[in-house]
Amino acid sequence: MFDLAQGVEMLRCNNTGIRFQGVPMPVRELLNRFSADAMPCQRRVAVQWVAAGILLPTWANGAQAQMGLSGAINYAGWFRALSQRMAKAYCQQYLQVLPGAAVDVMGLARKMVQSGNNELARGMQSGQWPADVGRQLADVQKQFALLNQLTAAPATQIALVVAASEQADRTLLVAQTVTESIEKMAQAPSARLVNLAGRQRMLSQRLAKNYFLNAAKVESKVVQAQLVADAADFRQALQTLKAAPVSTPAIRSELELADSQWLFFDSALRRPADDAGLSAVATTSERLLGVMDKLTSLYEAALREVLG
């Protein structure tokens, strides 16, 4: 049985590629799709998309299918965060908050969306997905195409920023739907932890996006209410994850780090939207995203071990 963690390590450490079910996967070609100067957490996620593509076409009944689905929850769940991350980066460009970093984030997010669409589409083409999940994945592609179009225009007008944010929210809704559908397919209570930890990635990006919208003088009761609700949801989810019976030393360590990074991010969100406050939100949201991504992967690995 192919072990995802081992496969990721192989992808990181050797350049000869691997062969799975007779299909050669050249590592250099795949990794070169992504920016060489991307943050470690971003490059890790890029590699994980590739690993997901290896597992998805081989789903079968039983534990192996459960493990493939645990990965799919993680990867499909990334669409939620990517929708908000693109809108956040677009608003950053409008506000000229670390604009170079915002351009890099936008570019990487687009590549991850395209790669994720391509890999998850394999399940559709091979008939592995139920019809409703296939339709949901197609809707995700459609909504991201619209978001790509909106964010391709220079971020010079607040109306464009608002339109991008609204489209990101529509994209988030369909991404949430497909993630929940795949979680139900897993038929394992622990799959909820992968989904819950993965949702924290999205919250880190939506909180930052809404902070930037406030800074851009977007008057919206929805934005204000969402900021308060998302902060409360993030805190509650951290407590739920801490209390969960699925735990390892690595998970406990990462939860402690998530706690500390959340405190930094929460403090930044409470700052005035001046240059220092805007930069603090931009940087701390990225750090928290990286921590929550690693934690999601740890829960996924723990679930695979339990099922295997």
Image (tube, rainbow, N blue to C red):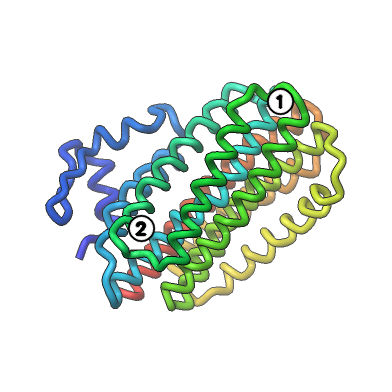
Nearer the observer, 259 or 172? 172
Residue position for label 2: 124
The answer to which quarter of the image holds residue 274 is: top right
Residue 179 higher or lower than 207, as above or below:
below
- Which of these two is toward me, 58 or 308? 58
- Indicate the quadrant where residue 71 lies: bottom left
Q: Residue furthest left?
A: 22
Circle 1: element type: helix
Of labels 1 and 2, earlier in sequence is 1
Question: Judging from the image, what secondary structure is the residue with disc 2 in?
Answer: helix
Q: Amino acid at mark 1?
A: Tyr
Q: Residues within 10 Å of mark 2 (few under 14, many from 20)?
A: some
Residue plotted at (40% across, 65% down): 70
Q: At which x and y percent is residue 169?
A: 66, 49
Q: Residue at x 57, y 68 (%)?
A: 241
Q: Residue at x 25, y 63 (%)?
A: 58
Please name whichever residue, 35 or 288, is drawn nearer the observer in this view of the structure. 35
Q: Residues within 10 Å of mark 1 (few under 14, many from 20)?
A: many
Where is residue 19 shown, x and y percent of the image? 15, 49
Give the left or right position of residue 16, taking residue 6 as reference. Answer: left
Q: Which mark is residue 94?
A: 1
Q: Nearer the viewer, residue 51 or 41?
A: 51
Image vertical order of residue 277 relative to residue 299, above or below: above
Does the rendering let one see residue 260? no
Q: Residue at x 62, y 44 (%)?
A: 84
Q: CA distance from mark 1 to mark 2?
A: 37 Å
Residue 132 located left or right of residue 306? right
